[in-house]
Amino acid sequence: MSKIARRTFIQSLSAAIAAPSIVSALKRPKPLPIAFSTLGCPKWEWKKILEQASQLGYAAIELRGIQGEMDLTKRPEFSDARLKQSLKDLEALNLRISDLGASARLHEFEPAKRAAQLDEAKRFIDLAHRLKAPYVRVFGNNYVKDQPKQATLERVIAGLRELGEYGKGSGVAAIIESHGDFNDSPTLLEILKGAEMPTTGLLWDAHHTVVAGKERPADTFKQLGRYVRHTHLKDSKPEGSGVRYVLTGTGTVPVRETVRVLAAGGYRGYYCYEWEKGWHPEIEEPEVAFPHFAKVIREYLGEAGVTAERV
């Protein structure tokens, strides 16, 4: 056999061997629109977060602190020197950032505290723009003691409007979470209508509207559905005067029903698991909770007819 013929044979053989893996890669199914919050894995470093998300079939990650640092703008992964590589890390595993979880509280009224909260949210909007993330989560949080509730509501509305204005042109919207004292649909609707613009919306934490707001998922979505941009899903059981977070499908929160309601209502965002390990170290480790949620939510999404279309 001539050298040319031998070379051609070897190249053909190599191509034949490689072909199955190429075909396999091409046939690999797209992940369902599921995400997890890094609040659930407070000890994991950046690369482990991404590797676990990819291996477990998640499509996106909600950034809510990394290794105890809740101010994401201070993390080295997102510094000028490393941001480009972090984006490559995400792209290599076909992952997206669903949103950034800021701690900004819009109820604050003392000038210095309020300025600090709004500054944090704006820094997060700037970072979200650089990370190509569509949303930054903020809180209304609490009614202020010894002040009229309406005064606090108006401050929250004004703050959300300010952040919405700041986000214009960035591709990033400020979304207020159903959280703290703001867990019922009528109150949230007043806020969302008061700050309504393309760059504002709602992060629907369905656990809070069910457990604290005493609402059924269908009733909440009927009033607020058009504002829902992102979700937090989790399960719990009553314990003492509060609740204990438990693995999805083993508690009393109607997570399956929430998924059906979202799907039937045309929701196109991520179904995001907020496992509050960072605040409740006694609950199961992410190595247990994240695979469990992925398995259960696939079942729920299949029942609801949700496919792997991109959000």
Image (spheres, rainbow, N blue to C red):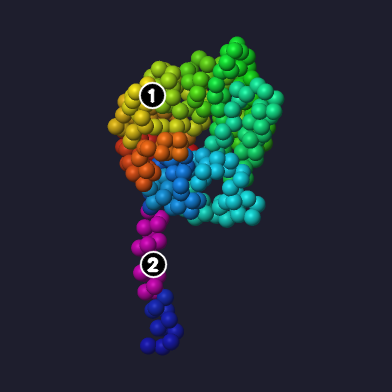
- In the drawing, does residue 9 fall left or right of residue 223? left
Position of residue 50 relative to residue 228, above or below, is below
Pointer 2 residue: 18
* Left or right: 86 in relation to 273: right
Q: Please state which of residues 196 and 38 is positioned toward the viewer in this rendering.
A: 38
For the residue marked with disc 1, what is the amino acid?
Gly
Residue 9: where, in percent of width, then height? 38, 79
Query: Residue 138, how many percent across, how many down?
Result: 57, 30
Q: Which mark is residue 242?
A: 1
Taking the image as shown, residue 21 lies to the left or right of residue 117, namely: left
Which of the two discs, 2 and 1, labels the residue nearer the N terminus? 2
Q: Is residue 1 magenta?
A: no
Q: For this rendering, which residue is in front, 93 or 239? A: 239
Asked if labels 1 and 2 touch by Cβ distance under 8 angstroms, the answer is no
Quarter assignment of residue 289: top left
Q: Main secondary structure of the magenta part?
A: helix
Q: Is residue 22 magenta?
A: yes
Asked whether the viewer can see residue 159, the reply is yes
Write the residue at 39% across / 47% down: 57
Which numbered mark, 2 or 1, is in the foreground of this view? 1
Quarter of the rendering containing residue 4: bottom left
Q: Secondary structure at mark 1?
A: strand
Mark 1, other Cα within 10 Å: few <14 / some 14–19 / many ≥20: few
- The part of the chain drawn in magenta is 12-27
C-alpha distance separating marks 2 and 1: 56 Å
